[in-house]
């Protein structure tokens, strides 16, 4: 299992929220991150990122 971090941002790039995701593959992490998308962009980082 690998740790990923999803950042919910404003359109200007300001971080609003971060969520740690522990997944077997990047594909699984991407699917979970897609579930966080409502109106704001989400960036997915490998590891703990910023």
Image (cartoon, helix red, strand yellow):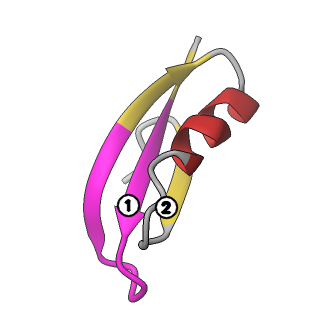
| Label placed on residue 42 | 2
* Count of numbered badges drawn on the protein: 2
In the picture, which quadrant includes the N terminus? Answer: top right
Q: Residues within 10 Å of mark 1 (few under 14, many from 20)?
A: many
Q: Is residue 23 left or right of residue 16?
A: right
Give x and y (percent) for residue 49: 43, 47
Query: Which of the 4 image quarters holds residue 13?
Result: bottom left
Q: Is residue 41 left or right of residue 28?
A: left
| Residue 9 drawn above or below residue 31 | below
| Residue 7 drawn above or below residue 20 | below
Q: Secondary structure at mark 2?
A: strand
* Magenta segment: 4-19
| Residue 41 drawn above or below residue 8 | below
Q: Residue at x 44, y 63 (%)?
A: 38
3D distance between C-alphas at marks 2 and 1: 4 Å
Query: Sequence-wise, which precedes: disc 2 or disc 1?
Result: 1
Q: Secondary structure at mark 1?
A: strand
Q: Residue at x 49, y 70 (%)?
A: 41
Q: Which residue is mark 1?
A: 8
Give x and y (percent) for residue 18: 31, 49
Q: Residues within 10 Å of mark 2 (few under 14, many from 20)?
A: many
């Amino acid at each position: 299992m690998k740790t990923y971090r999803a950042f919910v941002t404003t359109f200007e790039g300001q971080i609003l929220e971060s969520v740690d995701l522990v997944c077997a593959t990047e594909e699984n992490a991407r699917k979970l991150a897609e579930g966080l998308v409502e109106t704001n962009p989400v960036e997915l980082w490998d590891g703990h990122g910023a």
